[in-house]
C-alpha cells in the first residue's frame, strides 16, 4: 500500500466530515431523543408564557363613555328619590336598598382597579381619602 493510500484510510482528526460515505466518523450534535426533549421543553416554556400573557387583563379604555354612564345613573337615582318622595313608605324601603347595591358596585369597581394594577394610593386619591383608609374600607375581605 502506498503512502497516499494510507493517508486516505487514516482517521480524520480535523473535525471536517469524512470523505468516505460508509465509514463516516461524524456524529450528529443531538440524537433524535435529545432534540425531542429540547422541543418539548421549549413548548412547555411557550405554553407558560401564553398562560402568563392571557392572565394579564387587557383594558379597553372608555373614559368619556364611562363618565357619561355614571352621570346617567346619578340622574336615575335622583329621579327615583323624587318619585319615592311622592309615593308610599314601601317605596322608600326599595330606594334604601339601593345603598347596598351601590356599596357592592363600588367594591366591584375597586376590585377591578386592583386587578388592573392600580395602587391603593391612586384608589384613595380617587375616593378623596388616604391609601390606608381606602385599604381599610375596600381591601379587607
Image: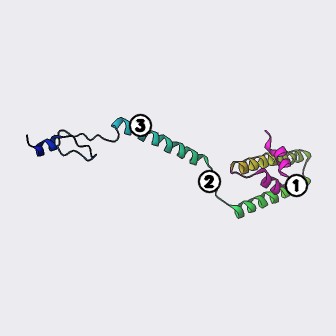
Local SS, label 2: loop
- Residue drawn at x 8%, y 43% is 2
> Is tag 3's residue or tag 2's residue first in the polypeptide sequence?
3
- Does 26 sit above or below residue 78? above
**Is 56 situated left or right of 108 in this image?**
left
Q: Is residue 14 magenta?
A: no
Span of residues in magenta:
116-141
C-alpha separation, residue under disc 3 versus residue under disc 2: 34 Å
> Is tag 3's residue or tag 1's residue first in the polypeptide sequence?
3
Q: Which residue is mark 3?
A: 37
**Is 10 situated left or right of 37 in this image?**
left
In the rendered structure, find residue 81 and report the number of the disc placed on it: 1
C-alpha separation, residue under disc 1 versus residue under disc 2: 37 Å
- Residue drawn at x 85%, y 52% is 130
Local SS, label 3: helix
> Is tag 1's residue or tag 2's residue first in the polypeptide sequence?
2
Amino acid at each position: 500500500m502506498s503512502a497516499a493510500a494510507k493517508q486516505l484510510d487514516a482517521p480524520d482528526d480535523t473535525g471536517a466530515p469524512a470523505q468516505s460515505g460508509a465509514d463516516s466518523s461524524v456524529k450528529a450534535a443531538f440524537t433524535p431523543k435529545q432534540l425531542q426533549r429540547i422541543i418539548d421543553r421549549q413548548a412547555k416554556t411557550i405554553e407558560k408564557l401564553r398562560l402568563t400573557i392571557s392572565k394579564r387583563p387587557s383594558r379597553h379604555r372608555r373614559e368619556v363613555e364611562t363618565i357619561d354612564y355614571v352621570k346617567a345613573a346619578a340622574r336615575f337615582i335622583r329621579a327615583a328619590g323624587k318619585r319615592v318622595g311622592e309615593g308610599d313608605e314601601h317605596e322608600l324601603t326599595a330606594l334604601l336598598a339601593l345603598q347596598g347595591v351601590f356599596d357592592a358596585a363600588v367594591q366591584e369597581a375597586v376590585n377591578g382597579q386592583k386587578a388592573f394594577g392600580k395602587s391603593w394610593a391612586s384608589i384613595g386619591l380617587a375616593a378623596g381619602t388616604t391609601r390606608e383608609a381606602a385599604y381599610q374600607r375596600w381591601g379587607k375581605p
